[in-house]
Image (cartoon, rainbow, N blue to C red):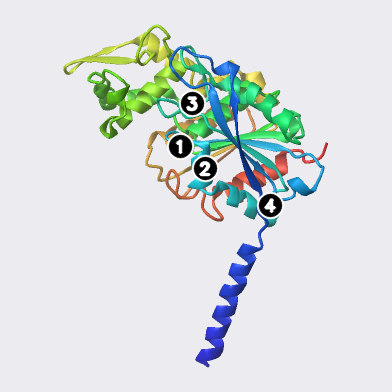
Amino acid sequence: MKRPVFLIIISLLFTHLLSAQEIPAGKVITTSITAKTLANKAGENSKRRVSVYLPPDYETSSKRYPVIYFLHGFFWSDSLLVNHDKINRIFDRAIHLKKIKPVIVVMPDESTLFKGSFYANSESAGNWSDFTSEELVNFVDSRYRTIANKDSRGIAGHSMGGNGALRNAILHPATFSSVYALSPGVLDARYFALTEIDAYKKTAVIKDLKDLSKPENTGATILYAIARAYSGNSRKAPFFADLPFSFDGESVKVNTEVLKDLKDHSVSELPFTHYENLRKLKAIKFDWGRNDEFIHIPVTCKSFSRTLELLKIRHEAEEYIGTHGSEVSRENGRIENSLLPFFNINLKFDQ
């Protein structure tokens, strides 16, 4: 009796492997754009790499495709999405299993000297929102067979990228119709700042970019990146940003104007300042892991959902059992089983 069972198991394993091998593969094109919108005084490179996923049937057909713009997280990049997360394989699998119809996915590299742009327009470091939602979109539409209208264009991202996806969808409803944010980070920058007082103390001993690159100063890097995005100062080298707190020993001085800048430029404020834009979006969804190690994320996601609910903005908000990244890019994870089906429903796939 043992031999037939063994043969059945081997047969099932072989079938599974064969099935995996038969999934048609799309193609990832790596290109670049020198962005006029990213001209800046803070030393950021305006030439940006872009990874473009083309579905398996792209080269054998003449049809046009909808586009999802997928934004990477802090300390990450487009190349890591492909080479580490193997996100293109998730797209292949989802298309093969008909969780989404064939689609183009655009992944720009918006990492910076401070590891992340937050996809926001900065007074000192470049206009990253304008780049993402205007210049990059025009670049892609001019080079690939896209369906070049908002009904066929969505935006998504993880962590900092989730923040950027919500920001750019709300600011640019004529560009994007739908948005999905995975574990969006720092939705309320003022709240985040007030929970990171100890991390701000390290900024007092950091004098230059070399100090900032040390592993023990990772927290300070995040704080300076947020400051460059929301309270940039092109006259204040070498960091080109104003911080909300400064220290003299154990004494702390609060810069209330900078705290106001952090609040005013946060995604959490956009429902109040751009209410009509929110109403123009066809679909909004964001999710987060219950056990996210970045403890501000569940708090601010729930608060953001309550704000949208009070303003009667239709949206989906979902908490699941998981950490910041444990369920995101694995097989049958959030990208495959939630994000891509969301866009399959909400994007227009024909012209």
Real-space CA distance between mark 3 and mark 4, rounded to the nearest whole angstrom: 29 Å
**At which x and y percent is residue 21?**
62, 63
Q: Residues within 10 Å of mark 1 (few under 14, many from 20)?
A: some
Q: Where 340 sits versus 139, above or below? A: below
Q: Are marks 2 and 1 in contact (CB under 8 Å)?
A: yes
Q: How many marks?
A: 4
Q: Amino acid at mark 4?
A: Ile
* Quadrant of res 257: top left
Regarding mark 4 in the picture, which secondary structure is present there?
helix
| Circle on res. 95 | 4
Mark positioned earlier in the residue sequence (1 or 4): 1
Position of 208 compared to 113: left or right? left
Q: Amino acid at mark 3?
A: Phe
Question: Residue 306: in sight, yes or no?
Answer: no
Residue under numbered circle 1: 76
**Farthest residue toward the bottom?**
1
Residue under numbered circle 3: 118
Real-space CA distance between mark 1 and mark 4, rounded to the nearest whole angstrom: 25 Å
Q: Residues within 10 Å of mark 3 (few under 14, many from 20)?
A: many
Real-space CA distance between mark 3 and mark 1, rounded to the nearest whole angstrom: 12 Å
Real-space CA distance between mark 4 and mark 2, rounded to the nearest whole angstrom: 18 Å
The residue shown at (42%, 35%) is 75
**Farthest residue toward the top?**
235
**At which x and y percent is residue 177?**
69, 31
Q: Nearer the viewer, mark 3 or mark 2?
A: 2
| Circle on res. 81 | 2
